[in-house]
Amino acid sequence: MGELLRMVEDEDDIDPQQLWSLATNMKSERGGDWHMARVENLTWRLRNMWSKNGQEAKNIGAAQRLLQFLEKSSVPLKKAPEEMRAPEGLQSVGGRQGLKGSQLLEVSEFGTGDFRTPSMDVCFRKDGSRLLPLVYKHHRVIDGILPSTSGLPFLGRHNSQGAQSLVVDMVDTYTEVQVQLVYTVFPSISAVSRRMVVKNSSKVGLGGVDLMKCMSATFDFSTDDWHLLSLHGGWANERHINTRRIQEGMIHLGSNRGVSSHQMNPFCVLSSGPPAEDHGQCFGFCLLYSGNWLMEVEQSQTGCVRVNVGLSNTHFSWALGNQESFETPECVCVFSDAGLGKMTRTFQHLIGERLIAPRWHDLVCPVLINTWEALYFEVYHDKILEFAKPAIEAGVELLVLDDGWFGKRDDDTTSLGDWVEDPRKLPRGLKGLAQDVNAMGLKLGIWVEPEMVNQDSQLYRSHPEWVLHHPGRLRSEGRNQLVLDLTRREVQDYIIDCVSQILSSANIEYIKWDMNRALTDAFSAALPPQQQGEVYHRYVLGLYRIFEVLTSSFPHVLFESCASGGGRFDAALLAWCPQAWCSDNSDAFSRTRIQMGTSMWAPVRCMGAHIAACPSHQTHRTHMLKTRFIVALWGTFGLELDLNKLSREELKEMKELVALRGKLCQVVLHGEYFRLPGFGYPGASHSNSAGIGDSHVYAWMFVTPEKDRAVVSAIVFHRDTVGKFPSRLKLQGLRPDYLYSLIEHVPTTVEEGVFNGIFQPGGPQFKHRRRLMLTGAVLMEVGIPVHFNFDGDAMLLELEVGGPSQEPKESNGVHVLAS
């Protein structure tokens, strides 16, 4: 009622049609309220009267008549500012705050009775009001995807076949600010994607609106034994699995670093009971965004839980002028009634089929070798060719020229921004290098970091204003570099032009796009004061535009994203870069835990993984080549070492492993992925082999869609029990009635000697000394024994179907195992 009063009191000119529309909406919201029914009837009559008697009668008597009617109806009004105050004698009353605060809502606004964390927070510049009570207006269902002009990635952008979208229109009946809730579903998949569009369509003279918080989606859940799974870490230690039971209060997950970050990943899982790999209900949430993000998980006093997913509201505001709109990033929610494993496979299918560009759907990532850990900045033409020679012998397909090839880049203090070949190192330029490398039978890729600039560069000397900074303050550097202001169109165009010239100048088929520091000093001299809260988000939108232009102009070039390793490993960038570097840490133990967490939502074929040199450049640990191979196989697969330093025997072994990868890669990269729980040694960490909780034993596998082939891997970090065997390894995803042949690859090489008083012959040894034939039922229900020889030992199995089992059903194949 107060909103209706303020509308007629605060305006010199009253639109009778709008007044009646407002009263009608308020009547619908307050169903059963006879006062509002009478108000609606009065405004309808006034509309007709005003239309007949003209403008003068409308302005003279409208407000007075309405106030008189409300006073006679004894409608209580809340206290308002002097210019909006109701007549004397009318008292304020409380709202229905208890009811609204316990409801399960699709969108929640600030200050209207729901005291949980809201979906939205706005500020109207005219009066400073932050209230936005939304009511349902109408909805529609459309085939396909609701079009977007925001530049943000979303599911179905390249492939919307079979998709349907529900668009729910909400409105604030006082200001007529509109909010669209957009839901998209895909056939035969237990998932929904959600985003929100806010439009300032105010017609009552309130002027601009500042969005202070605008989440992509709100999910409210009834009381249960809710647990939260999230991914945490740091540089060279990304995306470790963390679980906790939810209790009353608020949990904040997010990043305010300008990137999705090493520390937390824009993904979490809400599970009914402790999360498990193969049973239980769980809801997974993944935000398609590469900048500042926030996930709020709140359990209220009722026991209900709210999950908010969207942009971080720290240092965020967005100015909406009249008729302007703002669209949030998309949040993908997946439901599983069979544990984390089924949820993971749903995410991987959705991202692989509905987000990644169709031209990369069947990609088998080329086996690459990167110059970084072998040569660092010493990338001279002849040195590169010498580096490439053993790579050809080993079966490598792509040579990646990393940092150091441009400007005067002899260390990390200079030349970022000057994307021109260093003639000292590449006298014939990238074109000449590509010609020589191609003639050797290799493709060429290069490393770039276009979002950054060094002070010691031609670009900075020409355009110091292109850097994110406040002109009156000292700047903070990271890795001796500054961040370019991607909110500026001219900076975006400069980056597009530089990279386009590089790709046009030579036969370059791969780009490793790096970003080695977080955003600080996030002030843009190109934006007015009231828009400085938009810098972080506009930066990300600028990055997306750059990727969209470049990948459209050079569709044959494979882009891999990187940010000091896995600092920007998020689903959004997969829309343009179908693979991402998981971590700067390639140590086999560290990578196992990193890739376990990453695989919660990311397709395995997107996870950049390499065999690196030993001792590890990050941990100084040494692992045998077999173990490093098995972990690198669990991703895109490449090499990060100098093959010239290997012996002839080691190079021969590397060649055999690269050839084995070629045999298994279709199963690994395009098969169904399973983490294998319930495998381990006796003790507290028993059965944590799927990544949840502390464990020294991990196992995983891949199965083709036809279930006729599979690849199984297992690794032990530390044998803390001598003489004890781990439990049997139970497989998943097979056909129970199929008979599978088990082939063990890559034996463990042991030294000859006397151990525990017993002579042990040296040489290669397999876990199983003969070829096994077992049914899928036995492999899944009974499992297979695995005996590790020492810390860091590993196992790799290949399964091939020999045809449906002809054994009697009652035996279930158990006698095969017993024999």
Image (cartoon, rainbow, N blue to C red):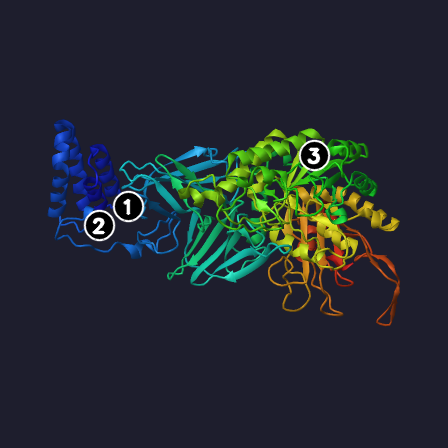
Instruction: Check disc 3 and report its element: helix, strand or loop.
Output: strand
Position of 135 with respect to 793 (left or right) is left
Is any part of residue 802 visible from this angle? no
Please state which amino acid type lies under the numbered disc 1: Asp
Q: Which residue is mark 1?
A: 127
Q: Residue at x 21, y 50 (%)?
A: 80
Instruction: Check disc 2 and report its element: helix, strand or loop.
Output: loop
Please state which amino acid type lies under the numbered disc 3: Glu
Position of 392 with respect to 360 (left or right) is right
Mark 3 and mark 2 in contact? Answer it, CB < 8 Å: no
- Residue 501 at x, y percent in the picture: 65, 30
Q: Residue at x 48, y 42 (%)?
A: 524
Mark 3 and mark 2 lie on one chain; the one further toward the N terminus is 2
Mark 1 Cα shell of 10 Å, populated few (<14), some (14-19), many (≥20): few
Q: Quadrant of residue 417?
A: top right
Q: Which residue is mark 2?
A: 81
137 and 785: which one is in front?
137
Mark 2 and mark 1 in contact? Answer it, CB < 8 Å: yes
The tag on residue 509 is 3
Q: Residue at x 20, y 46 (%)?
A: 84
Mark 2–mark 1 Cα distance, whole angstroms, equals 10 Å
Residue 553 vertical position relative to residue 241 in the rendered view, above or below: above
Please state which amino acid type lies under the numbered disc 2: Pro
Mark 3–mark 1 Cα distance, whole angstroms, equals 56 Å
Mark 3 Cα shell of 10 Å, populated few (<14), some (14-19), many (≥20): some
- Residue 145 at x, y percent in the picture: 47, 34
Q: Quadrant of residue 168?
A: top left
Q: Tell us which disc is closer to us: 3 or 1.
A: 1
Mark 2 and mark 1 lie on one chain; the one further toward the N terminus is 2
